[in-house]
Amino acid sequence: MSGNSIGVLFRVTTWGESHGKALGAVVDGCPPNIDLTEAAIQQELNRRRPGQGSSTSPRQEEDLVEILSGTFEGKTTGTPISLIIRNRDCDSNAYEELRNIFRPGHGDLTYARKYGIRDHRGGGRAAGRETVARVAAGAIAKRVIGRQGIGVLAYTQELGGIAAQEISLAEIGKNPLSCPDQKAADQMEKRLAEAHQQGESLGGIVAILVTGCPPGLGEPVFDKIDADLAKALMGIGTVKGVEIGAGFQAARMKGSENNDPITPQGFATNHAGGILAGITNGDEITIKVACKPIPSIEKAQQTIDRSGKPTTITIRGRHDVSVIPRIIPVCEAMVAICLADHLLRQQALVHNGES
């Protein structure tokens, strides 16, 4: 019960720390004969890699992945797939002054209370760098669900209080923030520059769209697929809220407004976000996640040291101004991992029912 694994049939375990020798993942339960190469995984990792923009950490990590097991001649074998990404550009010196001080907004205090020990260098397992292992595993999950025609796409819905107004998916790849509204993206870039100059950080909202998902995925009670999706996404350190479909807006609707009329051609609307009673209904799955501002900021903050004495802290080092857009492939990865697990569970149920 270490909390480092997720999934039932498609099970992912991540390991490693921000300033350790390496990070990685073990993927167990991946079906055999799926095309998989390091290059395919690398494409996803490159989207999350630091040092690619003015608002991201200048830490230079190539994030090169190695497949240590579970493939043969470019195909999965059905055995556990072990992945490793080595840390090449660690600079722990800036964190030495944090050895005995807890950073506000970070897991420093709670890790120390839970384990009686913590890795102060970048946050250890609580650091955003841990997500590199999730993206690597998610690249495999995408290939599992892709065989069934399921696609996962995430984009920036809001950043620093600026929201995309015109949603054009074709625009996502045309700006560094993966925003579907170019005008909003330009405003977001300016807001990021302002925050950087002020020693601040910004939060935002990521929207996730799942297409091609068949009906029937999910369990009726405790393993509802919306519950598992929310758990997978809330397991990302920056995420503080998850909405599926109409989300909180549903609480402001009447039943006649929130219910999706059913026609011979399908659902007339999609307030349910593609999920009813914890089971996919065949419509597009729509999700939004709220991401908090990055806690590591240059502004002076009140805190305490290990002895409980009050002090102030100004955090130095190499940090992003916002988790967006680097968090986008992480969100896609966690959704893909959850869907891959439920897809295999449904296939096992149908197979057992036919046998």
Image (cartoon, grey):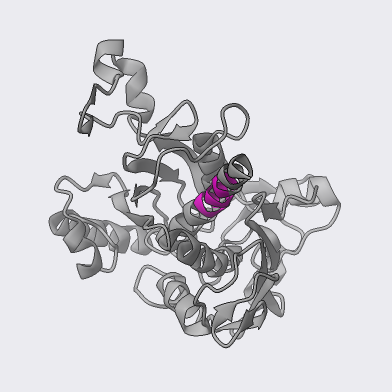
- Is 209 colored magenta in this rendering? no
Task: Please name whichever residue, 97 or 21, is drawn nearer the observer in this view of the structure.
Answer: 21
Q: From the viewer's perspective, is residue 13 above or below residue 253? A: below
Q: Position of residue 37 (x, y in %)?
A: 51, 82
Q: Position of residue 54 (x, y in %)?
A: 34, 73
- The residue sitting at 47% across, 84% down in the picture is 39
Q: Position of residue 233 (x, y in %)?
A: 52, 47
Q: Position of residue 278 (x, y in %)?
A: 50, 30
Q: From the viewer's perspective, is residue 335 above or below residue 124? A: above
Task: Please name whichever residue, 195 or 182, is drawn nearer the observer in this view of the structure.
Answer: 182
Task: Please name whichever residue, 10 or 129, is drawn nearer the observer in this view of the structure.
Answer: 10
Task: Please name whichever residue, 231 or 151, is drawn nearer the observer in this view of the structure.
Answer: 151
Q: From the viewer's perspective, is residue 252 above or below residue 57? A: above
Task: Report if residue 86 is visible in the image.
Answer: no
Q: Main secondary structure of the magenta part?
A: helix
| Res 48 → quadrant | bottom left
- The residue sitting at 49% across, 36% down in the picture is 226
Q: Residue furthest right?
A: 116
Magenta part of the protein: which range?
A: 338-347
For the image, the number of numbered tags is: 0
Question: On the picture, is 152 further left or further right than 99?
Answer: left
- Is 346 colored magenta in this rendering? yes
